[in-house]
Image (cartoon, rainbow, N blue to C red):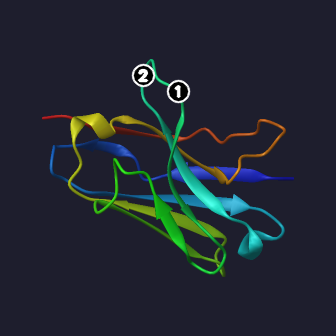
Amino acid sequence: QVQLVESGGGLVQPGGSLRLSCAASISIFSFTVMGWYRQAPGKQRELVATITGGGITNYADSVKGRFTISRDNAKNTVYLQMNSLSPEDTAVYYCNRNPPYASGYWGHGTQVTVSS
């Protein structure tokens, strides 16, 4: 049974940094393309970054150069290092497979708030 547990969010000032973690209970994790998504209040969920099992990454234009996605296949964990945060990055952040599970499963997410 799939389980995704995000952590590491919080309140940070503009220009600050946070590192998010996602513990994934996925049987073939090392072969699974993983992604970080976010949903801001009143907006659709959007894909922020993806990483293949071999470490090839891709980013949304809005975060390119500021965010870094990585993974540790031995720990079934995906990370998102977020630097130079701005209020526009405020959202609930989720990890999931890319594309997301057809069952509609999502974890609880972790709240990131960028505010002075």
Where residue 108 appears, as percent x and y from the top left, is: 61, 38
Mark identifier at residue 41: 2
Label total for image: 2
Per the image, the residue denoted by label 1 is 44
Label 1 vs label 2, nearer the camera: 1
Where residue 4 appears, as percent x and y from the top left, is: 68, 51
Q: Residue at x 32, y 40 (%)?
A: 89
**Image quarter for residue 82?**
bottom left
| Residue type beneath disc 1 | Gln
Residue 53 to residue 19: above or below: below
Where residue 105 appears, as percent x and y from the top left, is: 76, 39
Q: On the rendered structure, is 22 left or right of 67?
A: right
Q: On the rendered structure, is 86 left or right of 27?
A: left
Secondary structure under the numbered disc 1 in the rendered image: loop
Foreground residue, 48 or 92? 48
Where residue 83 appears, as percent x and y from the top left, is: 26, 59
| Residue type beneath disc 2 | Pro
Label 2 neighbour load within 10 Å: few <14, some 14-19, many 20+: few
Measure how far apart labels 1 and 2 are at the Cα level. Answer: 8 Å
